[in-house]
Amino acid sequence: MGTHSTQSTRSKAAFYGICCTFVLVIFTAVLQFIYEPNDRSRCSGMLNDGWWLDDAYKVWQPSGCMMHNFQTSEISSCLGHSKLLYIGDSVVRQQFYATATLIRENTTSIAPGHTDVRFDFTPENLSVEFWWDPYLNSTRTVELLESRSTASRPSLLVVGTGLWHMRHLEDDYYVEWRNSVNRVFDAVQGNKNKNNKIADAVVMAPVELPFFDQLSKDRHDTITLPKVEVMNGYLKDRQSELELTTSFAIPFAWNKISVGMNNATKDGLHFYPSVTQAQIQLGLNYRCNDQLPKTFPMSNTCCFRYPTPRWYQTIFFFLFLVWIPFGMYLAGSGYMKSVTQCLFPSESVLKALFLFGLCVIYMFFGDRTHLFGKIHKHFDPAMFGGLLVAVLVGGLVSLKSTNEGDLGFLNRDQTDEWKGWMQVIILVYHFTGASSVSGIYNAVRVLVAGYLFQTGYGHFFFFYKKGDYGLGRILNVVVRLNMLTFVLQYLMDTDYLSYYFTPLVSFWFFVIWITMYIHNKANRIVWFLLLKIVIASMVTTTLIHYPGILETIFEWLKLGFNIDWDAVEWRFRLRLDAWIVYVGMLSAFAYIKCMEYKLHESGVWPMVKKTCIGLSCVGMTWYFWFELSQDTKVVYNNSHPYISWVPILAFVVLRNATAKLRNTSSRFYCFIGKISLETFIGQFHMWLAGDTRGLLVVLARPEWARGLGWWLNLGISTILFLSVSYYLGQATTELTKWICSGVNKASQSVGAPRYYETNATSATSAAAAAIGGGNGGGNEYQSIPLLPATTQTLDTSVHTETSAESPSVSARGSIDEELGSPVKRPSWTERIGWFWGDVRVKCVAFLLCLGIVNRLC
């Protein structure tokens, strides 16, 4: 009793701690959003702060957002096939050349240094022009700034000055420089609401902060740090006077880009292309990012305004934040009970819906608003290895063993643990961006195959042992697997196939169900069952590899439901694991037969066991040697479908080599395994960001997420991520029960024949026996991948209607008489109730609604 009380106290303390952390993170993020209006599109952070993610200076990380690397076609499209104009000194000229090189590689010029240069790119209908004017006081510059120029208005104007003022004007440098930049400020401020704007967007370069120790003597004497700081301070003061809507920016982060590098310059003043390329990309992000398509995937978030929620997204907000809380209030207050019962489900379901809604709306605000910052991924081998060591230690310190007999082959704890450690590795792999490393990518592909092996093993075991192929069974699995994904594809305005694992597991579940359902009475005949598996593998192989089949199916989906899926991507996903599900099915069948014939009790079993263990060690060693020896991921992918079973079966054998190993499991990995579905899908929007392209920053100030701050953000975001996944799993489980048991409740509410109630009870008892049978041995129960045990109850009333053994309507009277109930002819209202309570009718209505909604989306 004391132990239970202590555990309950700890659970409450953990819950309150998580809630406080959650509230603190949200509260600080909202305050930051309110009190820094300049950064509501993450534009100010990009223009003013950032850091290099790598020592090679290839990835620049703006503060709080993810930059887009623009290519030639995107530049010309964004700038309206017009022109870019650069005006200033040699520093601006370097950026001019960097832009020209970005548009057309190997672009060069033989023009003298202090002259104008122009490049016309005919195919792109784009021109890039540079005016040499280090003081910004030439006639045509003044005419342009005063809107008196006859030249076409540039789409992007970049101006920069200051170095020549310091270098050549001595004591008068500041006054002359201030007059020059004031002309630019006055032009932008005076013409911002007129059609004769000087440019669609203006970028003024800050006064460059050079490498002073590398300057020549005459430059070092005249270009000093105090001068640069005074001039840039004035630019900040003048910029603060402009309205937020003005198309004008001073990217002070340009200086941080150069200063943060080593060996970036030869003379201390002019920087290498690695600097100028990053600077012009930042300028292009300011000018063009908000013109990028505002559709999935939304992975470019700097100076980007997320689209206004669509009508169906608004419906979700209203449902989860208004309608359901209103129902909870009515149910809790005790008023209008009749109204509450008609318009709302039970109070427990309302609570589950509200919890589910809070979780998915948290994902929306995390990945579809600028409430939280977002940063790029960066692969660091030391970081990747450190995280794996940390989760390994977490798994080892939470090991537990039981002496209550042999838990059996692939028991519940073992499969939960298996799912858990695989999921942890996949999470670390995604978080650190390790997919770029072939040796890591190849091994992770086996982890995905391991999930599908469990899919084949678990579902085959259930169908073979329980023989339940009813629609209720299908709905329980499909609804549980797809509920979160289904809601997110509309709420986040994404693609169902982008959450690739859910559709993948759902597809293979249907393959297993169809294979086992066809002439299921003959499943005990070995050759017939094996023949069905062979035929199923041939059919799926043809579906996957034969050109045109998937394309035709997806065209029908596009025509009927307005579903636009990528057949090439889906074929790639299916092809990678085309055989491992059948390996899982055959493994389950082999295990069942071994138990039936009691092969483990024969005299040769010890020798067979030792041989299998030895072969497993050799197979595991061979696999890692093979995958690490492959040149690229593409080369490995060609072999993966045919060899992924080797490490998986080797692991299964080694993991079950002794009773001690079978009875030992890690509580940490088991916990993750029980919420593996929620963590896999939830990571897309509340741990990762930008539709998995980046990382979510939950710290109030995104610039804190560097150095040790990166680890602090990792810790806080992980706590929130796992907590939300846990409660999301509980809510989804409750909602799955509610959805799949609705037909039984509807039948009872209108006076359904007692026949249904009796069969429901017996079938539920059978299901309960199946669920609880894991303690005596592996042959009594096999876990279903990604589904907690509590979700495996069946919609038994549906099963009784669809089962081949169900009696006809005319036979119900005799059954009722045997049960002692008088036969009562149902009224027409009762018949209508049964009709609309029929799950098949609901499925048809759901598909029709799906088609209508998708047509309107």
Image: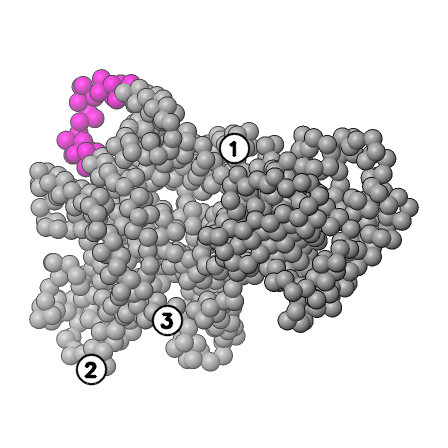
Q: Are marks 3 and 1 in contact (CB under 8 Å)?
A: no
Q: How many marks?
A: 3
Q: For the residues carrying marks 3 and 1, which lies nearer the camera in this image? A: 3
Question: In what element is the residue under mark 3?
Answer: helix
* 278 sits left or right of 180 in the view: left
> What's drawn in magenta, residue-wise?
588-614
> Which label sits on residue 384?
1
Q: Residue furthest right?
A: 171
**What's the image's color scheme?**
one colour
Please name whichever residue, 603 or 720, is drawn nearer the observer in this view of the structure: 720
The residue under label 3 is 856
Kind of residue at disc 3:
Leu
Q: Is residue 595 magenta?
A: yes
Q: CA distance from mark 3 to mark 1?
A: 44 Å
Q: CA distance from mark 2 to mark 3?
A: 35 Å
N-term mark: 1 or 2: 1
N-term mark: 2 or 3: 2
**Disc 3 crowd, CA 10 A, few/some/many (<14, 14-19, 20+):** few
Q: Relative to 662, does residue 426 appear above or below in the rendering?
A: below
Please name whichever residue, 256 or 361, is drawn nearer the observer in this view of the structure: 256
Q: In which quarter of the view is residue 274 placed?
A: top right
Q: Is residue 373 visible?
A: no
N-term mark: 3 or 1: 1
The residue under label 2 is 828
Q: Looking at the picture, how far across and down is residue 560, in whole percent? A: 26, 66
